[in-house]
Structures are given as structure tokens and as C-alpha cells.
Amino acid sequence: MAAWNEPDRSSAAGESWIRRADPDLTGQKSRHERCPAFSGSGTIESETISFHGFRLVRIRDPLERLDAFDMADLKSPDLHPELVKSLLESLANWDSRASVPLALTYMRRGNSEALQEFDEMALSHPDSAEMLEGRFLSPVPDRDHLASLPEGTLGREFEQFLAKNDLDENLLRESAFISAHRERGDEAGYLAERGFQLHDLFHVLTGFDVTPLGEVRVVSFTVAQIPAPYPAMIIASRPLQMVLYKPLLLPAVMDAITEGWALGRRAKNLMGVHWEEYWEYPLGDLRREYNLER
């Protein structure tokens, strides 16, 4: 089902419209509901209006709080010289992995208040409390078992994804970012560890490939679901790289960011799901259930 943002220039600041075709909705209806958001309150107000088969959702933007203060009065602290050096090196490097050392340096040398805000956003995620209570971490998947599952199941598709792209199922489980997050606290460390376990599964669930633009789509999807420093650094630095060195590629990068972000905002929350318990379920059914169809 297609979805796109349509700013309503006549509405009050802090509100936006999402227009979505919905053949099941006819006539005119109006209702208010509480929707998940990445704000301290965890919810935002929205109003849904149906009109001639279209559903219009007016959402109170959680970022409207920015209107409460004069942006001109904000002061940016100086960046650590090591972080500046890493940023410049990453921008000049066209290897798709160049953002990894940059993001690690950011975890060590980034502004403490900015990093704290990332922690706060992750911990205020709607699924975080339940996740932290159970601290679920999956064992390394049995690829022989996954390969034996019927075609079209999540497990079989995941195994085929790993095989096709010659990926090590243990690689992200040993990421240096996990220990970097654990240094910021046990709770942030656990959420990061579970997030890295799910990265390749997010590729399979969303259908985004492992090309450079496919990775941009997945990290944009991830940030839309639950903000974190590493994926956020990628979607922040890639457009700047294009602007500085290759503007012709900027539209493609922005399209990839937008596509991943829009799907991440439209989909149900995925972080708290024990996906490894759904290996035998049809992937198509899971995509429909979690609003992942594109």
C-alpha cells in the first residue's frame, strides 16, 4: 500500500499529513488515536479522516518541541580533533565500509550530550522495557536446519540470503559496536547487541539487498524504527559525501534514505520480536503482518 507525506501548509506548525489509499474505508470518518513515537512520552496524537477511499492521518510531530526555542541560540560544541579527522577520512573514502571507523570514533569521541540523547531515544522505544526485562539473545542459527526448511519460509530465506552474499552469521554478533555501547551502560549495550543480531534479518524482512544503496535503505529503516549512532552516522554522512564530491549521486542516495525511512515508520515495531522463533513461518505472511510490504 503506497504512502507518502503531504505537508499541509495551512496547518499549525508541528503537524503533518500522511495520505494513504485504503479501499476498505469509505465515506467520512474521524477518530483520534495514540501512536508510537520516539519522544519522551512514547506517544503522539493523530487524527484519522477517511474520505472517498483515502485515509488522511494528521500527526502531531514530536519534533514540534524544537519550535519552543530559538535555533539561533543553540551552540554546537567543538568536535574532538580525532572525530574531525575520522569524518574527513570517511567522506573521502568511497568504500562502503568507511563509515565503520567513523562511527566507532564517534562512540569514543562524540559529544557526550549527543550520545546520551541516542541512549535516551533507544531506552524510550516502545519495546525497550519488555526487551530489557527478558534480555533475549538468540543462539547462532543452525544453517543446516534453516536450509532444510520449505521454500519461502523466513528461515530458508535467511539462509539463502547469507549464502548468496557469502556472509558469516557470526560477524555482526562480534561487532566492536556492542562493546562500545556496553561502555555506555548495560541497558544500551543489550539493545545494541540485539540490534546487531537483527541487522541481516532486517535485510530479509524488508527485501533490501546488500549493495551500497541497499545498506543505506536498511540503516534508514533501522533509524526510523529505533535511532542508534552507527546507522544514523551512515544516513547523515552519505548525503554530505555526495554533495561534496559527486552531486549526481545525491538523488539516488536520498531516494534510498527516504524509501528505508518511510518503510521503517510505516512498519510495526520489529525490535522486540523474537524472529528466530518464526523460522518456519512464510516470509510473505510476516511481511503482511508487520506492514513490511513494498
Image (cartoon, helix red, strand yellow):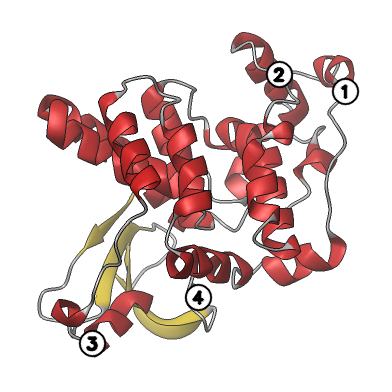
Q: Which residue is painted at 64% across and 61% down in the image? A: 184
Question: What residue would you read off at disc 3?
Answer: 69
Give the mark, 1 or 3, whose residue is nearer the N terminus: 3
The amino acid marked with disc number 2 is: Asp
Using the image, tell me which numbered label, if any, was put on residue 142.
Answer: 1
* Whole-percent x, y for residue 88 in the image: 28, 35
Question: How far apart in space, not on screen, are marks 4 and 3 (Cα)?
Answer: 25 Å
Of 230 and 76, nearer the camera is 76
Determine contact: label 4, label 3, CB under 8 Å.
Answer: no
Q: Quadrant of residue 5?
A: bottom left
Q: Is residue 214 left or right of residue 17?
A: right
Give the mark, 4 or 3, whose residue is nearer the N terminus: 4
Quick one: SS at disc 2?
loop
Determine contact: label 3, label 2, CB under 8 Å.
Answer: no
Q: Which residue is painted at 31% across and 20% down in the image? A: 94
Question: How far apart in space, not on screen, are marks 4 and 1 (Cα)?
Answer: 37 Å
Question: What residue would you read off at disc 2?
Answer: 168
- From where the camera sits, is residue 260 visible? no
Question: How far apart in space, not on screen, are marks 1 and 2 (Cα)?
Answer: 12 Å
Determine contact: label 2, label 4, CB under 8 Å.
Answer: no
Of 209 and 47, nearer the camera is 209
The 10 Å Cα crowd at callout 1, few under 14, some 14 to 19, many 20 or more, is few
The amino acid marked with disc number 1 is: Asp
Question: What residue would you read off at disc 4?
Answer: 35
Q: Is residue 24 above or below residue 157?
A: below
The amino acid marked with disc number 4 is: Cys
Question: How far apart in space, not on screen, are marks 2 and 4 (Cα)?
Answer: 37 Å
